[in-house]
Image (cartoon, rainbow, N blue to C red):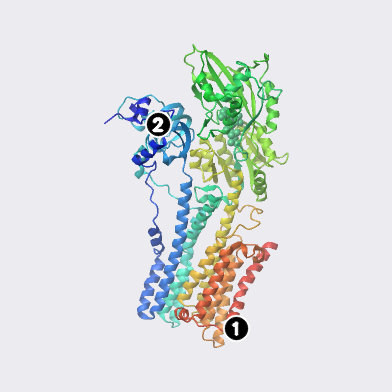
């Protein structure tokens, strides 16, 4: 066996893969390598097969008993009955199957959309590709916050720190190196020149060559041992499952009573048994938890189409209850399309880059700084890849012919002290013919303490750091993002420049101001949030004055009582003091990512439901603790995405507000569905339960019960789930998170509508019997069916009248209602159907009477809504 990859030198590894660091692989090489190695995916996830989903529909105990009972009764009575019942049960199962299958597949499609991206060198350029397209031999760039996409041998490392706990179980950061390690068999944790798939970069950056992909990686070898992420149920799903269990017991109790009373009154015991069983199947809301899942999953899919990708289903539910949105500024509220506006070299006047730049002047160093102190690269279409701040700086330099690629021959980079939000600055070290050039840029507060020389090199004027303060304030108040620039030159004889000392005794060069305009849609989204009772708070790493200016622009800050708090102030304040003013703080500026979790917790302990955005590695804990953690699809890191509940594909604040609206709509629709299903069930159960006490025979046959459950309740019920958002959905306050699904009159509605339905059905049965009409049962069946149709139309909104909602807003519902009515007419008037359903044709007068008798349900629900609206 040859050497292990960690024993090979960088050059040996490159040679073994017939590639080099400048060029990377060519397209033809990639095609061959894909054929040889397959794609870079782990194949351990099992998808639920369609057959398994179908089978699970029949796994319901009651359904099985019903099928068996139907078969037995076929031998005792009429086989048509049995066939009809079995057909209905199968149809029911199919309906369940279609719904669940759709939900499963939409969740899968959502997962597939969130595939991570990697920066890979192909044909001499870095390009971004989905990580599953990586092949052995690819040159990959790594940066902080990324999950390592394959097993790599590190070729270049800038203080690369990797958390390998997912593989080794040990959570301390491993600092990676590039030199070959001679020892033959080394545990993963000691292979310091290797980086492994699935582990994450916590700091620094690096370039590595892929040595294995997919199932051949260390992670792949243990993939079968990895547990699949268990999907957690949402609180609503759990509550519903518990409620369904309780209701099952109640319904079974009622069924026993119905069976017993019928039996003792001398009714046919077989018929009584079938009636009780059918009622149990129809009355038990076993499908409710499933319907909630389906509604949430389909809602998640709809959100995906609107640029918010749901990673965890419970988020859909929490979104509807959000009371606080804590959002980043850069890129989320602003366009992240930065542009250098001007400079200040002396802290007084603002200026732009001069046309002529003489060597060794301040401008010469400034432009070298802009050009060289960044990690921007260009893809084959000359599109700049990298951080927008750095792209803007690099671009400003390129415009006056200071291009990193040209300059790097003259001033090759020998080291980098990378940027992190905590450090707030970045330094690169370059070697020239005569000296070591140190270039630093960063937030003024971070850079100033490291500067020793305050001198306008060109004018020979010296000045103090304090004199810069007013320049910074006035630039920031205009909304500019400000960076300070500095440099240092050390003689070449200082062969060993220690990293710690590189950022000391710097020479201050000047300030650069960048403009990042607010997104045009952000202002409207802030207004919408406010009208929906949701507070918007900006949390940013930027300067407080810059943040305040943008916050004012967007109406996040509107009055003098609205406060801006800095990270420094936040670290000094006590919990009690913070709680007192927390509702006035609209902007947190110069906040370290670690402080975000503190803000989330403080808000949560004041009873708020918090949606929090984040994009960096250190944002992960806050994203996890927030009720809805929101990460960025474009600019964010893998780590933040992994920790979040939803991903904004367009990084846009307005999308969060849209998602909240969608969350509210989904919750509303779940309530509507539950309201409809439970009222329908209570109507049917009460009709059968009360009949004997009123001296009436069993008003419905088993097949009627099953039919109403499947067709009359089933299809319109599903169509209710597609109801659009109500007009006032973003004008009402968020629902209380403690609120039960049955709050705001839902259970009372279920009870009174149930009694009314049962009263009307039994009323027509009693009247018809009294009149000597033989088909009293058909009339009872018809009234019950029509009440359901009237009800579903009335509860399309909890408060708005049907006439305000209009016909066009839920076509699916109108179609299902119309179809159900037509099918019911077929059941009444087609002889073949009469035989199966034991119905007889009604006269026109009788049909009209049924319509009139069933209408009070519709009318009284409209009256209930009138009260809702007006009182
Ligand atoms: P937000 O949290 O709203 O996205 P932000 O992007 O401004 O805010 P950070 O990226 O943490 O927050 O930046 C904080 C500060 O660090 C900036 O105001 C800027 O002064 C400085 N800075 C940003 N990017 C760089 C960089 N690449 N190199 C050096 N300094 C930087």
The picture quadrant where one finds residue 822 is bottom right
Spot the residue most to the front. 28
The answer as to whether callout 1 falls within 8 Å of ligand 1 is: no
Secondary structure under the numbered disc 1 in the rendered image: helix
Q: Residue at x 54, y 69 (%)?
A: 680
Vertical position of residue 868 compared to residue 265: above or below? above
- Of the numbered discs in the image, which one, if any, rests on residue 209? 2
Q: Residue at x 39, y 64 (%)?
A: 58
Vertical position of residue 551 compared to residue 305: above or below? above
Q: Residue at x 48, y 75 (%)?
A: 704
* Residue 370, image x, y percentages: 58, 25
Position of 547 with respect to 624 (left or right) is right
Residue 449: in sight, yes or no? no
Secondary structure under the numbered disc 2 in the rendered image: strand
Residue 770: in sight, yes or no? yes
| Foreground residue among 224 and 596 | 224
The answer as to whether callout 2 falls within 8 Å of ligand 1 is: no
Disc 1 target residue: 845
Quarter of the rendered image showing ligand 1? top right
* Residue 852, image x, y percentages: 62, 78
């Amino acid at each position: 066996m040859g050497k292990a990859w960690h024993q090979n030198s960088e050059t040996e590894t490159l040679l073994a893969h017939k590639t080099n660091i400048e060029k990377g692989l060519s397209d033809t090489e990639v095609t061959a390598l894909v054929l040889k190695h397959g794609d870079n995916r782990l194949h351990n996830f099992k998808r639920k097969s369609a057959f398994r989903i179908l089978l699970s529909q029949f796994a319901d105990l009651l359904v099985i008993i019903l099928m068996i009972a139907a078969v037995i009764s076929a031998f005792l009575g009429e086989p048509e009955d049995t066939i009809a019942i079995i057909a209905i049960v199968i149809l029911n199962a199919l309906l369940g199957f279609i719904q669940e299958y759709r939900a499963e597949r939409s969740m899968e499609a959502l997962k597939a959309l969130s595939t991570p991206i990697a920066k890979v060198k192909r044909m001499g350029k870095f390009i971004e590709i989905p990580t599953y397209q990586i092949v052995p031999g690819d040159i990959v760039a790594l940066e902080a916050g990324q999950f390592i996409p394959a097993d790599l041998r590190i070729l270049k490392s800038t203080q690369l720190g990797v958390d390998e706990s997912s593989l080794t179980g040990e959570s301390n950061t491993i600092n990676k190196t590039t030199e070959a390690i001679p020892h033959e068999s080394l545990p993963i944790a000691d292979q310091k020149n290797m980086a492994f798939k699935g582990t994450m970069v916590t700091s620094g950056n690096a370039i590595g060559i892929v040595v294995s992909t997919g199932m051949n990686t260390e992670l792949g070898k243990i993939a079968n041992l990895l547990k699949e992420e268990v999907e957690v149920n949402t609180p609503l799903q759990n509550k519903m499952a518990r409620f369904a269990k309780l209701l099952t017991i109640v319904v079974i109790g009622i069924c026993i009573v119905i069976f017993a009373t019928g039996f003792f009154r001398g009714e046919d015991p077989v018929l009584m048994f079938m009636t009780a069983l059918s009622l149990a199947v129809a009355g038990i809301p076993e499908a409710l938890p499933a319907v909630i899942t389906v509604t949430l999953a389909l809602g998640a899919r709809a959100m995906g189409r609107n640029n918010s990708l749901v990673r965890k289903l419970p988020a859909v539910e929490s979104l509807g209850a959000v009371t606080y949105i804590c959002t980043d500024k850069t890129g989320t509220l602003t366009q992240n399309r930065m542009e250098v506006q001007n400079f200040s070299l002396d802290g007084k006047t603002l200026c732009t880059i001069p046309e002529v730049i003489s060597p060794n002047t301040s401008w010469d160093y400034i432009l070298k700084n802009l050009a060289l102190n960044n990690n921007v690269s260009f893809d084959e279409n000359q599109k700049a890849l990298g951080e927008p701040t750095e792209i803007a700086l690099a671009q400003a330099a390129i415009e006056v012919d200071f291009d990193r690629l040209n300059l790097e021959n003259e001033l090759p980079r020998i080291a980098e002290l990378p940027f992190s939000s905590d450090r707030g600055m970045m330094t690169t070290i370059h070697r020239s013919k005569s000296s070591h050039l140190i270039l630093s840029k960063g937030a003024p507060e971070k850079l100033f303490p490291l500067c020793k020389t305050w001198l306008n090199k060109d004018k020979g004027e010296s000045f103090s750091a304090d004199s810069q303060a007013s320049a910074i304030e006035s630039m920031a108040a205009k909304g500019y993002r400000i960076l300070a620039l500095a440099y240092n030159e050390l003689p070449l004889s200082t062969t060993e420049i220690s990293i710690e000392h590189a950022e000391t005794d710097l020479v201050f060069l000047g300030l650069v101001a960048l403009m990042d305009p607010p997104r045009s849609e952000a202002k409207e989204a802030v207004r919408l949030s406010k009208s929906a009772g949701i507070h918007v708070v900006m949390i940013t790493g930027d300067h407080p004055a810059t943040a305040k200016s943008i916050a004012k622009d967007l109406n996040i800050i509107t009055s003098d009582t609205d406060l801006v708090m800095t990270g420094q102030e936040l670290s000094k304040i006590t919990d009690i003091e913070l709680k007192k003013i927390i509702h006035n703080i609209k902007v947190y500026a110069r906040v370290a990512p670690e402080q975000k979790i503190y803000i989330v917790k403080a808000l949560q302990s004041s009873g708020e439901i918090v949606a929090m955005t984040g994009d960096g590695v250190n944002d992960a804990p806050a994203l996890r603790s927030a009720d809805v953690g929101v990460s960025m699809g474009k600019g964010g890191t893998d780590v933040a995405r992994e920790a979040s509940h939803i991903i904004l594909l367009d990084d846009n604040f307005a999308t969060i507000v849209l998602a909240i609206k969608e969350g509210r709509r989904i919750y509303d629709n779940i309530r509507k569905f539950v309201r409809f299903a439970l009222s329908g069930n209570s109507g049917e159960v009460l009709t059968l339960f009360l009949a004997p006490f009123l001296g009436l025979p069993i008003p419905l046959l088993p097949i009627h019960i099953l039919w109403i459950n499947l067709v009359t309740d089933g299809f319109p019920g599903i169509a209710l789930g597609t109801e659009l958002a109500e007009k006032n959905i973003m004008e009402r306050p968020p629902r209380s998170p403690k609120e039960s699904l049955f709050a705001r009159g839902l259970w009372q509605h279920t009870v009174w509508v149930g009694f009314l339905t049962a009263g009307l059905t039994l009323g027509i049965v009693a009247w018809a019997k009294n009149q000597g009409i033989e088909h009293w049962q058909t009339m009872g069946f018809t009234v019950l069916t029509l009440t359901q149709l009237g009800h579903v139309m009335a509860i399309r909104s909890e408060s708005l009248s049907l006439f305000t909602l209009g016909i066009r807003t839920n076509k699916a519902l109108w179609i299902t209602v119309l179809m159900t009515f037509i099918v019911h007419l077929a059941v009444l008037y087609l002889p073949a159907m009469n035989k199966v359903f034991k119905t007889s044709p009604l006269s026109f007068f009788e049909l009209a009477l049924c319509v009139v008798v069933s209408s009070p349900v519709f009318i009284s629900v409209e009256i209930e809504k009138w009260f809702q609206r007006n009182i």
